[in-house]
Every structure is written in structure tokens, then in C-alpha cells.
């Protein structure tokens, strides 16, 4: 009997250590859709623990929110990676300090929580190797497509623009939005309008 108890305690300790690894990994790489699923597959899946149960137990105050991919099959949605957003950028920095500023991800994190206050149905889009940060839905119908970028430049504008345009084509939208820190502009791509608007102007 004592051997069974010893094995049980060892398993619990192993699970606890791996849960801490997951928490740390999410802190270091939040807003990345690969983070949660990668940590889950490495540490938790072999122990037959569900992803939802982890966050119910480890995240009782909802300090981290998981954003699902927009797919019309619930089963498919469950197996797709989710993006993690910390409730506060300052809290994330204290828990897991990083040598880089990650301004783009912090802006995306701030945009998420502003949207979360206004809308209950939020998703991200990822098809054709292109991603759009936020799909706002009402009554299960997409109503707004939003991309987030700290500052558009020659290195990232194609990626940010093409991800948004791909989502616009997929959902048959004529307008899309890119939220930046301070830039403001308008562009027409394939006959579709993309507005570039600073964060303060959208949520101020």
C-alpha cells in the first residue's frame, strides 16, 4: 500500500512541476498561438489532463485568457492552438521578465482586453499560413477584422496586410482595421479598404 501512495505522490509532484513550466512558457511567449498547445503537448497530454482543466485549476482569477481560432466545428476548435493573453502587461513583466520589450505583443495584449470588455465573441483567424489577430463576432457572425502592429514598416507591412486581406477575402469583408501605436493611414488592396488607426483613437 505504501508503494502505491509513493507512486501517487511522485505523479502529483511531476504534474505540479510541469504545470509551472507551462505557466512560465505562456508568460514568456504570450499572444503566440503556438505557446499553449506546444506546452500542453510536451508536458500535460501524456498525463491525460485536459487543457481546460489546467486553466480552471491554475487560473481561477482568469489572469490568462485563451483565444480560440475561429472555425465552425466545435471539435475542430478544441484541437486547434489557442493564443494566450495576460490580464495585465505589467503583471506579465513581473512574473516573467524578458530582455526584449516585445512592444508589438504588449499592444496586441492591450487591444485584446479592450475588445474583451466590449465583445463576448472573440477569435483569431489562421488559414493559408496567414493570420489575422482578431475576429469580432456577434451572434456567431463575424462583424469586424482587426490586425495589430506596433509600427508598420518595410519588414512587416506585407505580412500584416496580407494576413488581414486573406481574412477579408475569407469572410467577404470590404473593410479591415490595423491598430498601431501611433500610425494613421489608409490603403486600398484588391479594391478593399484597410484603415490604419492608432490605439488611442480606437479606444480613447
Image: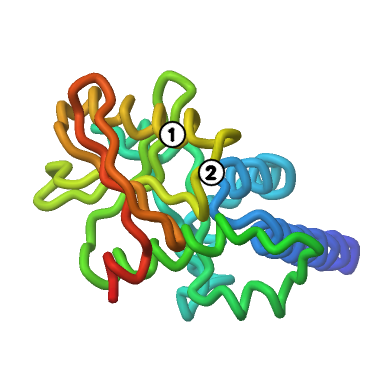
Point out which mark residue 131 bears: 1
User: What distance separates the C-alpha of mark 1 from that of mark 2?
Assistant: 10 Å
**Front one among 39 and 108:** 108
- Image quadrant containing the N terminus: bottom right
Q: Earlier in the sequence, mark 1 or mark 2?
A: 2
Horizontal and vertical percent position of residue 140: 14, 45
Give me the residue at 74% from left, 66% from top: 20
Q: Residues within 10 Å of mark 1 (few under 14, many from 20)?
A: many
Q: Is residue 20 above or below residue 47?
A: below
Quadrant of res 156 = top right
Residue linked to disc 2 = 33
Residue at horizontal 71 percent and vertical 57 percent from the top: 25
* Above or below, comparing residue 20 to residue 174 in the picture: below
Secondary structure found at label 1: strand
Q: Is residue 109 left or right of residue 21?
A: left
The mark tally for this picture is 2
Q: Position of residue 115 (x, y in %)?
A: 29, 64
Left/right of residue 135 with respect to residue 36 in the rendered view: left
Amino acid at each position: 500500500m505504501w508503494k502505491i501512495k509513493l507512486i501517487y505522490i511522485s505523479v502529483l509532484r511531476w504534474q505540479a512541476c510541469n504545470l509551472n513550466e507551462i505557466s512560465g512558457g505562456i508568460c514568456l511567449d504570450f499572444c503566440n498561438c503556438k505557446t499553449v498547445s506546444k506546452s500542453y503537448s510536451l508536458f500535460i497530454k501524456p498525463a491525460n489532463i485536459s487543457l481546460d482543466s489546467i486553466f480552471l485549476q491554475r487560473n481561477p482569477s482568469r489572469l490568462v485568457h485563451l483565444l480560440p481560432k475561429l472555425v465552425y466545428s466545435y471539435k475542430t476548435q478544441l484541437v486547434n492552438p489557442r493564443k494566450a493573453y495576460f490580464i495585465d502587461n505589467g503583471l506579465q513583466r513581473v512574473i516573467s521578465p524578458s530582455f526584449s520589450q516585445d512592444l508589438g505583443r504588449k499592444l496586441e495584449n492591450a487591444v485584446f482586453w479592450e475588445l474583451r470588455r466590449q465583445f463576448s465573441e472573440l477569435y483569431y483567424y489562421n488559414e493559408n499560413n496567414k493570420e489575422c489577430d482578431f475576429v469580432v463576432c456577434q451572434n456567431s457572425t463575424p462583424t469586424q477584422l482587426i490586425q495589430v502592429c506596433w509600427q508598420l514598416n518595410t519588414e512587416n507591412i506585407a505580412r500584416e496586410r496580407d494576413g488581414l486581406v486573406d481574412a477579408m477575402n475569407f469572410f467577404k469583408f470590404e473593410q479591415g482595421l490595423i491598430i498601431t501605436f501611433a500610425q494613421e493611414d489608409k490603403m486600398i488592396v484588391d479594391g478593399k479598404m484597410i484603415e490604419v488607426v492608432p490605439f488611442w483613437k480606437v479606444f480613447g
